[in-house]
Amino acid sequence: MVSIYRKAYSVVGVILLLQYFLQLYFIAAAVFSVWQANDNQKDVYAGFKNGDQFAGIHAGNGDLAGIVIILLLILSFAARQPWRTTILTGVLFILIVIQATLAHTGIALVSAFHGINALFLIGLTGYLTFANWAFRRPAAQAQTAGTTSP
């Protein structure tokens, strides 16, 4: 029987992946609000103002993702996941700290690594979520549920 904590780990992992995809949406909305503005002072100002709202949502959701990663780390211990899983979940926390730091360096060429680091966050979260997926059928059930072998 799979523990409720392992199932919670899987669910929280999916929620975190959804947050990452929302992050991509929000930052794209911010960029396109400015980029697609007509080339006049009024529209560019409105584009920046609208883009700033999406960027704020992006930042807030990023902070929330950090909290969700802490929850995932706690669930990793509670579910008694293998040490490799727990350590890699801890690496997620380190990556989100790096992510926050990169967003606020004030040096554009360094802050640009924010997007690269996001790819590592998405990849590692996807790996951890699906490698430790608690909702798959046990092997014995899968064999008996399939076709009978000769």
Image: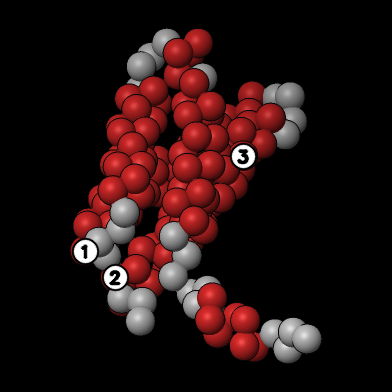
| Near-viewer residue (111 or 132) | 132
Dot 1 surroundings within 10 Å: few (below 14), some, or many (20 or more)? some
Dot 3 surroundings within 10 Å: few (below 14), some, or many (20 or more)? some
Element class at badge 1: helix
- Relative side of 7 to 48, left or right: left
| Near-viewer residue (87 or 50) | 87
CA separation in Å, label 2 and label 3: 34 Å
The disc placed on residue 78 is 1
Asked if one can make out residue 50 in the rendered structure from this viewpoint, the answer is no
The relative height of residue 143 versus residue 96 in the rendered view (above or below) is: below
Task: Tell me what residue is drawn at x 49 percent, y 21 percent.
Answer: 113
| Near-viewer residue (126 or 142) | 142
What residue would you read off at disc 2?
5
Callout 2–callout 1 Cβ contact below 8 Å: yes
Residue 68 horizontal/vertical position (percent) = 32, 54
The mark that comes first in sequence, 3 or 1, is 3
The mark that comes first in sequence, 2 or 1, is 2
Name of the residue lying farthest toward the right: 150
Task: Tell me what residue is drawn at x 44 percent, y 60 percent.
Answer: 132
Dot 2 surroundings within 10 Å: few (below 14), some, or many (20 or more)? some
Task: Tell me what residue is drawn at x 31 percent, y 76 percent.
Answer: 4
| Near-viewer residue (148 or 55) | 148
Residue 20 horizontal/vertical position (percent) = 50, 48
- Residue type, mark 2 in image: Tyr
Residue 144 horizontal/vertical position (percent) = 62, 88
Closer to the eye: label 3 or 1 = 1
What residue would you read off at disc 3?
28
Query: Which quarter of the rendered picture does the N terminus lie within?
Result: bottom left
CA separation in Å, label 3 and label 1: 36 Å
Asked if one can make out residue 48 in the rendered structure from this viewpoint, the answer is yes
Residue 102 horizontal/vertical position (percent) = 39, 23
Element class at badge 3: helix
